[in-house]
Amino acid sequence: MTLRLLEPDLEGTIAFLGGIYSNHVALRAAAEDARRRGAKRLFCLGDLGGFGPNPGKVLPLLDEFGVRTLAGNYDVSLAEKRPDCGCGYTHPSDNHFAQLSYDYTHRRTTDPERARLGKLPGSIRFTRGGRRFLLCHGSPRKINEFLWESGCSDAFLTRLLREAEADTVLCAHTGIHWARRVPGGGLVVNAGAIGRPANDGAPRIWYALFEAGEEEPRFVPVTYDHESLAREMEEESLPAEFVETIRTGWWTTCLEILPAKERARGKY
Ligand SMILES: [Fe+2]
């Protein structure tokens, strides 16, 4: 299902938040930061749960900040009570940690929350400055496709934009942000994630912002009280590997899916 916004053209500053992964502390910090910068609209590109503690804290915050949200693979899996997150990992180690995270989140998700997750649209379309924007989770063609910067040629992205009938595509799912304008003017932006750091050795998280009148996105770093989240994860007996990532900024799990170039930037 695609949600088409009724506004004829979305002007002003708008913010895009990638996967939340139950990081409610970072969600509040990022939403407040975006509001401070004048964002009139906030969008979330899906994956509300996973990795972090107490998933029930996320939906109320999205409501509080009026964040328009689409469905990620995690949200679909929880809504439909599927046995796994459907992240699309292939390595046993990645799947092991993904399952620990999913089983915890599954147990902590109520039926009313599942019903809400089940109503999230698969994509959102609007125009801005006459350009056709398409928001999706993985890619326009698949909810759990990983669009890594190193794995996407200009020709591939151009085809993706053409087939999606969009001038600008916003996606997430991978957890690492990047943006590229392809020859001809099309733009693809992976907003990354606000739920865990970008595997760059710092505990801050990032979101994508289009400022009023700007056609180029900028990525905004947000420092937040990551220590309070880390302690909450420990109280919930979540894996120590997950907690380490929140404290250090280095990914320790679900790494095998990374292409060589992205992997080489990390510590592990
Ligand atoms: Fe995802």
Image (cartoon, helix red, strand yellow):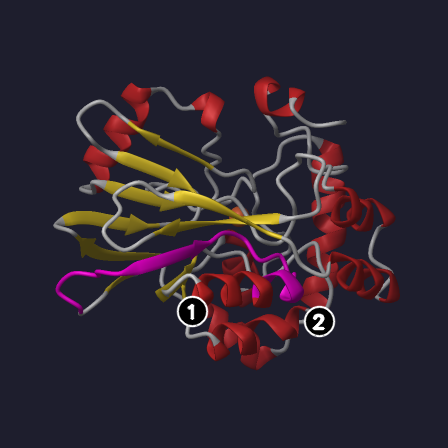
Q: Secondary structure at mark 1?
A: loop
Going 38% across and 40% down the picture, which residue do you hit? Answer: 189
Q: Which residue is mark 1?
A: 67
Locate residue 77 relative to residue 130 in the image: left or right: right
The label shown at residue 108 is 2
> Is residue 160 magenta-colored?
no
Going 44% across and 67% down the picture, which residue do you hit? Answer: 35
The magenta-colored residue range is 7-27
Give the CA separation, mark 2 to mark 1: 22 Å
The label shown at residue 32 is none
Quarter the N terminus occupies? bottom left
Place of residue 148 in the rendered image (x, y in percent of width and height, measured from the top left) = 48, 30
Going 71% across and 71% down the picture, which residue do you hit? Answer: 108
Q: Which corner quadrant of the image does residue 253 belong to?
A: top right
> Is residue 13 magenta-colored?
yes
Place of residue 187 in the rendered image (x, y in percent of width and height, measured from the top left) = 28, 36
For label 1, count other residues whose C-alpha is less than 10 Å away and answer few (under 14), some (14-19) or many (20+): some
Locate residue 99 relative to residue 17 in the image: left or right: right
Say if 202 sits above or below 246 in the image.
Answer: above
Which of 23/4 is in front? 23
Q: Secondary structure at mark 2?
A: loop
Q: Which corner quadrant of the image does residue 184 belong to?
A: top left
Q: Amino acid at mark 2?
A: Arg
